[in-house]
Amino acid sequence: MSTLRFNVVETAFAKKVKPVEAPGKASAYFGQKVFNREKMFRYLPEKTYKELMDVIDNNASLSHELADAVASAMKKWALEMGATHYTHWFHPLNEGTAEKHDSFSEPDGKGGVIDKFSGKLLIQQEPDASSFPSGGIRNTFEARGYSAWDPSSPAFIVGDTLCIPTIFIAYTGESLDYKAPLLRALEAVNKAATAVCHYFNEDVKKVQAYLGWEQEYFLVDEGLYAARPDLLLTGRTLMGHESSKNQQLEDHYFGAIPTRVMAFMQELEIESLKLGIPVKTRHNEVAPNQFELAPVFEECNLANDHNLMIMSLMRKVSRRHGFRVLLHEKPFKGINGSGKHNNWSLGTDTGIMLMAPGKTPEENLRFITFVSNVLKAVYRHNALLKASISSATNAHRLGANEAPPAIISSFLGKQISTVLEHLENSDEEDFNLCGKQGLKLDIARIPELLMDNTDRNRTSPFAFTGNRFEFRAVGSSANCASAMLVLNAAVAEQLQLFKTEVDKLIAEGKDKFAAIVEVVSKDVRESKAIHFDGNNYSEAWKKEAVKRGLDCETSVPLIFDAYLSKSSIDMFESTHVMNHKELEARNEVKWETFTKKIQIEARVLGDLAMNHIIPVATRYQTSLIENVYRMRDLFPAEKAAVLSAKNLEIIEDIAQRTIFIKEKVDAMVNARKVANKIENERGKAIAYHDKIFPMLEEIRYHIDKLELIVDNEMWTLPKYRELLFIR
Ligand code: ADP
Ligand code: MG
């Protein structure tokens, strides 16, 4: 190992692993840093508390008096907790979170300061919004957007700051973030699903969407990370030959967690629990240095806030343990990438899980109704759902063999498939058997059938797993809201359509259950193309999917077009989740972000190739040349030629590869110049995808070959075998 590489490793390993002490039982500190219901009850007068619950649970309107009372209680609690600042915490379109801290204290006019926090400051603020992506909705000269309190997600304290979850919207009303449309989608699915529930249960008042995410991530030693400019600047390694040992032995998955990593996990869990995040599962993942963390599922909006909080906690806590966390979907070539499975379901305020079978035929008809509506929604919007999880970074994962392919389909398992087949082929007589006499359609048998849970398919991007659907194509660095708002909105739209059709049949005099079965059967037939229980990684499936008419586009900039198709615009507008203008603006941001990511990678790779790789390779080549000359001094010409033959080959190999790299880097600079002149963001992103991205791979190929040839002493960049094995 070169002296440089050795030094950086030393600094990181020098950090001792300090065992993390838990502050007692989890129940003693869970939610300690959250202004949750329990604290609201304690800090608010009873009447005010009740009013606030009505706002949170039933969307009742929020009066100024109530906001003032809540702000004052929140301030009291925050000051007691040692907070000095507050911030509106929001999710701009650049995939992170944003905050601007203000101090509670203000001059009191008498030479002192006083702590202040009013209802007005709680409800609404105007962050200087001009530097957040807006896709042109907000021109820089009228940079007026505001953040508005989301009472459904509780405020929390990080460090010395009270963080208030907010939505971020333009003064003209368009959303500039992920939370606003997510909340609208959740409201849409609540309304539509509640209406459909009423066919079965009159007393349902509310339907909630649930999300249980599973966050995968890599850890690397901080010292090694610092010596890899590509990791530092792009989040992934742009070069690096595979380590001789990586995941072939499959010895990392569920293996013992290394001590240093365990200390990190423990601290992360303690911090998460204090923030009210119900973390539950931790384990090693398939690739070396890859891990997973999952909480118990929660209401979707809250679960998403918690995921964003965890991602930023991971970044902070990892540094205290001499690590850097990598949330990029594909930090290392040749080994598994990281995803974030989104487990999703719907449940009522009366405690019914709508994606779980029940005990009676009627309960099971309800179950099949919801499952088939989800399938229909996923079928109708499969291109859009793919767009919702697509990004420059996730593109490395989709289609590679460890992740779902860039085709959305749904796995149901043998049991549900059998029921759906029955429905598909059922006839008028079966419908007549509905209602009083029960159903003939195998629906009664579902619970027994589902007992067999071995029926799992890990290759499906959208799999039914017993009581929920698991959307597996979501990327590890993504804001889950992107996928969740599309899924919930699509299901909401479908449930509305379903209800309209069923109501029509009922109005024509059909029995309620017979009408439901009839529409469900028709929907099952119509959405058959989305149902696939086979191996999604196979070549045969790609061909089959084309035949079935599913969206098979693989170019990310073109995948984004799905947001602007007529069916998508109709869906978003009919559910009031987003309008045409917002969709167009968001796509501008998506294309621009795609371009920038590839642009940065191209620059970083160009720099490294020119000022790391070529100089090092040339230095080694020179030492070989020197050796060839010395051989001639030592031995007769003929013998010297024989002895130097291998070195001459290497000298030539290095020469050819460095020439290729230099030429490609120049070509890449020129291709960027051409692409940068393209005015529209879509065209530019397509150019970056088609022209520049492939060059990164071509250059890398030769760099990785050089890594194998050049003297290890001289190679300055930490190698995969060093980055990937935490000691
Ligand atoms: P696996 O790796 O087998 O998929 P995990 O236990 O790692 O399972 O993660 C499953 C996730 O799904 C957890 O977050 C869990 O809380 C969540 N989950 C379980 N049931 C539901 C449900 N009905 N709706 C939404 N999420 C659920
Ligand atoms: Mg899972």
Image (spheres, helix red, strand yellow):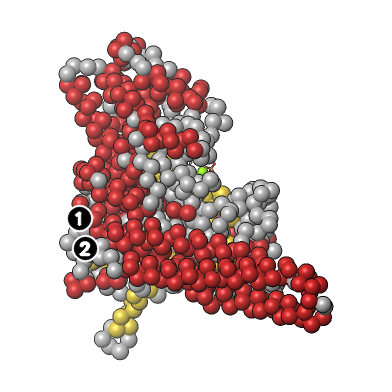
Which of the numbered marks, if any, corresponds to residue 100?
none
Q: Residue at x 48, y 34 (%)?
A: 540
Nearest the eye: 514 or 161: 514
* Residue 669 placement: quadrant: bottom left
User: What residue type is disc 2 on?
Assistant: Ile
**Is residue 310 visible in the rendered structure shown here?**
no
In the image, residue 142 sits, relative to residue 584, either above or below, namely: below
Describe the element under mark 2 as helix, strand or loop.
Answer: loop
- Circle 2 residue: 137
Rendered-image quadrant of the C terminus: bottom right
Would residue 133 be found to the left or right of residue 217 on screen? Answer: left
Nearest the eye: 410 or 45: 410
Q: Residue 584: x percent and y percent?
A: 23, 55
In the image, residue 393 sits, relative to residue 537, either above or below, namely: below
Residues tagged 1 and 2 counted as in contact (Cβ below 8 A): yes
Mark 2: few/some/many CA within 10 Å (<14, 14-19, 20+)? some
Q: Residue 373: x percent and y percent?
A: 33, 32
Nearest the eye: 94 or 452: 94
In the image, residue 3 sits, relative to residue 467, either above or below, namely: below
Q: Earlier in the sequence, mark 1 or mark 2?
A: 2
Describe the element under mark 1 as helix, strand or loop.
Answer: helix
Nearest the eye: 173 or 722: 722
Q: Residue 588: x percent and y percent?
A: 28, 60
Q: CA distance from mark 1 to mark 2?
A: 8 Å
Q: Residue 289: x percent and y percent?
A: 61, 58
User: What residue type is disc 1 on?
Assistant: Lys
The outermost residue toward the bottom is: 111
Mark 1: few/some/many CA within 10 Å (<14, 14-19, 20+)? few
**Is residue 241 visible in the rendered structure shown here?**
yes
Rendered-image quadrant of the N terminus: bottom right
Q: Residue at x 24, y 25 (%)?
A: 502
- Circle 1 residue: 581
